[in-house]
Amino acid sequence: MTEPSPPLTENASRAGARLALGADVSEMVHELVEYRELLLSLVRRDLLLRYKQTIMGFGWAILMPVTYMIVFSMIFTRVVKLETGVPYPIYVYAGLLPWNLFASSLRFSVGSLTANTTLITKVYFPRELLPFTAILVSLVDFAVGAIVLAGLMAWYHVGLHWTIVLLPIVILVQVIFTAAVALLLSMGNLFYRDVKYMIEILITLWMFATSVVYPVNRVGGHLAPILALNPMTPIIDAYRSVLLHGQVPAIGPFAWSAGFAVALLAVSWVLFHRAEFQFAERI
Amino acid sequence: MHQGLIRFDGVWKKFRRGERHDSLRDLIPAMARALVRRRQGDDLDRQEFWALEDVSFEVSPGEALGIIGPNGAGKSTVLKILTRLIRPTRGRSLVRGRIGSLIEIGGSLHPDLTGRENVFLQGSIMGMGRAEIARKFDEIVAFAGLADFIDTPVKRYSSGMNARLGFAVAAHLETDVLIIDEVLAVGDSAFQRKAFDRMQVMVSGGIPAIVVSHQLDRITTLCGRAMLLARGKVAYQGPTSECIEAYARHQPAPAVSERAGDSVRLDSITRDSAAPVASGDRIRVVIAGDAPAERAEARRVVGVRVRSLQTGGILYASGTEAHGLDLPQGPFELEVDLEMNVSPGIYAIESAVWQWQREVDAIFGPVALVHVSGGPSFWGSVQLKSAMRVKARPAGA
């Protein structure tokens, strides 16, 4: 009787191998399965660190969207009255909560590779785990922040609808899109540290181009066709549809976001995987 | 039976000197250039060089391969390709089974996490499952000798404690192949001894292993076979002792002392026989050279220096002046007899020339090698020719 042979790992030149896509994809999938425990360990590490180094701990996950909610509620209920169908505080919080998931995922992931230089130059593991960790940690914050949303819904007597069963799909699409952008940004920052400085501007601009604090379709004009392409707007709208309005998300725009997210993730992941072997040389 | 395997098939690796464009400002012109000029993967740019050229080897179960060579020869590049940190430019490396790297990872422990938390994190980074780490946890902590500090944040550790914990985790990974890279500079001498013993146990267990070290005695103890790398090429591959000899011969030896108006040429050093000797045996070497002109203020001394190739340590040096000899003008031969009162190993006898009472200016010429094998049994590096007597002592006095 023979023991099963241990797996064979090949590290071969991919020079001139534009066709090696199959090899790359199988390697990517294989590694993700092999290193799943590491992903959890890294998430555990980051949560643990947050808990250790801050007094508020997870309180910060709530404070940020709540502060923004109060500020924007002042502006859009007192300074300018904005018609949103549901009470404005709950409208804006339902937008800020998922937006914060997106924004903090990007903020954490952009430096996730450069913050782990010693690891990257000494031990091999799929490097995409580092930006993915940033997203998973932000998801925990998102879950904590959702408690406030539940509180607001009770306060304003917004009942639950059956459409809440669609919520996991909405979250999934958002996470896929976030992962795609996070891979590109973290990789970009490793090669060009400019990215780290660019990100704050990017996030701010992007927020106002998305229906986070106001319905972006009110902007109109020349910008309208460009804003309509923003894949984040249908996602944020979808949260409000399934949570506050009891409606199925608008199929057309949401399908665009979902399709775009999946396509972008596929492209950015393959790019990331191919660049990964330069990380140790270039970091 | 171990089934791990390490194989390098014609591996080439290209590196780039100097900085690459690190900001977008430099990227755009570089991309434009790349578009205009389509390059083959094999060509070298002005700034590029081959860090490895056509390196091939195979390590099967029960074998350990040592890699030696001067700094910059490509040793670390080989390890980086094996552990998949970088991809080869050409060729491939194949590894069957899980790779364990005994490298210095103390630096990657997280300062704000406790020792315990770091063990679990580091373990999973190196590929261990949580259950496996939990099973090995006590063993790891005991090995590092940190049982009392395991729940202290690592930032409060001394650098030695840090390194010990890092090594302990790496040393308890269950692997199919093993890579050891210069980790012996870790911790105090007691821990170094312990770490080395652990390595010997792992290697003698039959896992295929690769050892990179400048300490040639470590390589000799751990590996039956070695490979000499020089400027990215395999200069020699074969039995460790022969490889170390090749390394000694390979080291550049400036043979001529050329000062203005004062030149002594060392042409050769020859030994009476190439056969190995036993500890305590006498050998004779003959240095041939030429001292064309003598200046009064510069009395030249010619002699030998004996170096252990395993440790690199200098054991002995002496020259004509200490033996009351003067160097004649013109071609000369100098006979040197040495009693090899040393432990078994390989020793380099270097010919040397220096100025009277100014040993710092010594210049070393051709090298002869001596194998010392066997002889009277002792431990250590020098035969002190001890004499021992034993007597019975009156009891109860």
Image (tube, helix red, strand yellow):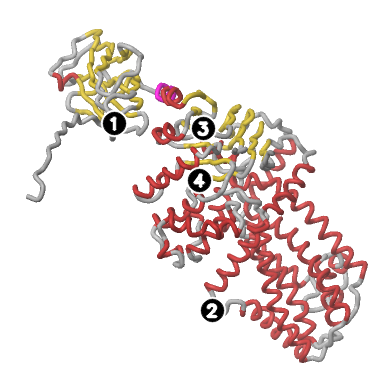
The amino acid pointed to by label 1 is Ile
**Can the viewer see residue A60 in this picture?**
yes
Tags 2 and 3 in contact by the CB under 8 Å rule? no
Query: Can you identify the residue that label 3 sits on?
Result: B65
Query: Can you identify the residue that label 4 sits on?
Result: B102
Q: CA distance from mark 1 to mark 4?
A: 29 Å
Q: Quick one: A263 or A58, which is closer to the camera?
A: A58
Q: Residue furthest top?
A: B331
Query: Can you identify the residue that label 1 sits on?
Result: B314
In this rendering, do the residues under marks 1 and 3 share a single chain?
A: yes
Indicate yes or no whether the magenta region holds residue A42.
no
Please determine whether, in this image, residue B286 is positioned above or below residue A25: above
Q: CA distance from mark 1 to mark 3?
A: 26 Å
Q: Secondary structure at mark 2?
A: loop
Give the x, y percent position of residue B256.
32, 18
Q: Earlier in the sequence, mark 1 or mark 4?
A: 4
Dot 3 surroundings within 10 Å: few (below 14), some, or many (20 or more)?
many
The amino acid pointed to by label 4 is Leu
The amino acid pointed to by label 2 is Ile
Q: Chain of mark 3?
A: B
Q: CA distance from mark 2 to mark 3?
A: 52 Å
Q: Secondary structure at mark 1?
A: strand
Query: Which of the 4 image quarters holds residue B339?
Result: top left
Q: CA distance from mark 3 to mark 4?
A: 15 Å
Q: Chain of mark 2?
A: A
Q: CA distance from mark 2 to mark 4?
A: 38 Å
| Residue A55: mark in rendering | 2
Q: Earlier in the sequence, mark 1 or mark 3?
A: 3
Give the x, y percent position of residue B68.
47, 31
The magenta region covers: B246-251
Tags 3 and 4 in contact by the CB under 8 Å rule? no
